[in-house]
Amino acid sequence: MNKVQCPICDAAMPGTWQECPDYPFCSARCRKIDLGRWLDGKYRVPDSTPPDSRSTAGQGDAD
C-alpha cells in the first residue's frame, strides 16, 4: 500500500483515507490553509484566450 502525504505540509497521512476526516489533508489546519490559498487566488488556471478576443468578447450584442 502506498503512503499518501499531505499536500500542504508533506506529513504522512495517519491510517487510511477512511480514518482521516480531513483527507487529503493530515489535519483541519492544513485543510484551512488550502482553502485560504484558494480564496486568495493563489491557485489559478491560466487563460489561453488571446488578449484581442478578450477585449471584444460580448461587444456588439447590446442594441
Image (cartoon, helix red, strand yellow):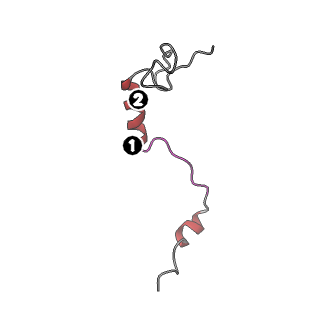
Which of discs 1 and 2 lies nearer the camera? The answer is 2
Residue 23 position within the rendered picture, expressed as x and y whole percent measured from the top left: 47, 25
Dot 2 falls on a residue whose secondary structure is: helix
Nearer-the-camera pick, 51 or 20: 20
Residue 62 position within the rendered picture, expressed as x and y whole percent measured from the top left: 47, 82
The tag on residue 39 is 1
Q: What residue is drawn where x is 51% and y is 15%?
A: 12
Mark 1 surroundings within 10 Å by alpha-carbon count, few (fewer than 14), some (14 through 19), many (20 or more): few
Q: What residue is drawn where x is 48% and y is 16%?
A: 11
Which numbered disc flags the more N-terminal residue, 1 or 2? 2
Task: Report the number of numbered marks.
Answer: 2
Which amino acid type is marked by label 2?
A: Arg
Label 2 belongs to which residue? 31
Residue 41 versus residue 47 in the image, above or below:
above
Dot 1 falls on a residue whose secondary structure is: helix
- Magenta span: 41-48
Nearer-the-camera pick, 26 or 41: 26
